[in-house]
């Protein structure tokens, strides 16, 4: 008891077709789908908020940033000797 069988579902759909007409049913189904989607999103958000309020586990501390590597000193081969200015 309490479950909708195939006969009851067909009866409900026929009554909806008679009341709303075939042109309004797609728009009605779309709006009902959006309403169910928003309801589920709202309940998930509420559940998430309640869980964090009841069991506020501290967030894991972020890993410290690695120190910047010092700039590599140029090798002796890469260093060009200063050229004297021609006067």
Image (cartoon, rainbow, N blue to C red):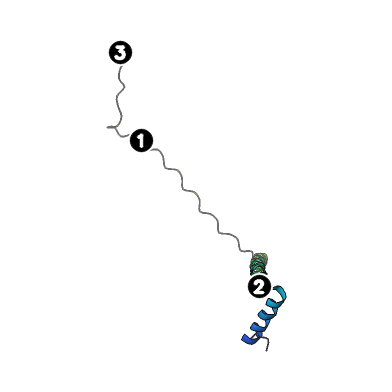
Q: Looking at the image, which residue is at 64% across and 87% down?
A: 7
Q: Residues within 10 Å of mark 3 (few under 14, many from 20)?
A: few
Image position, residue 29 (x, y; %): 65, 70
The residue labelled by disc 1 is 73
- Sooner in the amino-acid sequence: mark 1 or mark 2: 2
Residue 56 is labelled as: none
Query: In the image shown, does 74 or 40 lie closer to the viewer?
Result: 40
Tell me if residue 48 comes above or below residue 16 in the rendering.
above
Drawn side of residue 80 relative to residue 51, left or right: left
Q: Is residue 51 visible?
A: no
User: Which of 29/4 is in front?
Assistant: 29
Direction bottom: furthest residue: 1
Q: Position of residue 48 (x, y in %)?
A: 64, 66
Q: Which residue is mark 2?
A: 22
Is 83 situated left or right of 59 in this image? left
Secondary structure state at the residue bearing disc 1:
loop
Instruction: Please tell me which of labels 1 and 3 falls first in the chain.
Output: 1
What residue occupies the far top of the structure in this picture?
Answer: 87
Q: Residue at x 58, y 59 (%)?
A: 59
Q: CA distance from mark 1 to mark 3?
A: 30 Å
Q: Residues within 10 Å of mark 2 (few under 14, many from 20)?
A: few
Indicate whether 73 appears above or below 36: above
Percent position of residue 78, x then y? 29, 32
x and y, in percent, of residue 85 in the image: 32, 15
Q: Residue at x 45, y 43 (%)?
A: 68
Which element carries disc 3, helix, strand or loop? loop
Residue 13 in view: yes
49 or 5: nearer the viewer: 5
- Say which quadrant the C terminus sits in: top left
Circle 2: element type: loop
State which quadrant residue 44 falls in: bottom right
Q: Where is mark 3, residue-wise?
A: 86
């Amino acid at each position: 008891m309490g479950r909708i069988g195939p006969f009851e579902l067909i009866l409900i759909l026929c009554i909806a077709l008679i009341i709303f007409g075939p042109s309004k049913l797609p728009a009605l189904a779309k709006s009902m789908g959006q309403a169910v989607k928003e309801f589920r999103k709202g309940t998930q958000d509420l559940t998430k908020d309640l869980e964090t309020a009841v069991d506020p586990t501290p967030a894991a501390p972020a890993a410290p940033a690695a120190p910047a590597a010092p700039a590599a000193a140029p090798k002796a081969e890469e260093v060009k000797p200063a050229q004297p200015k021609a006067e």
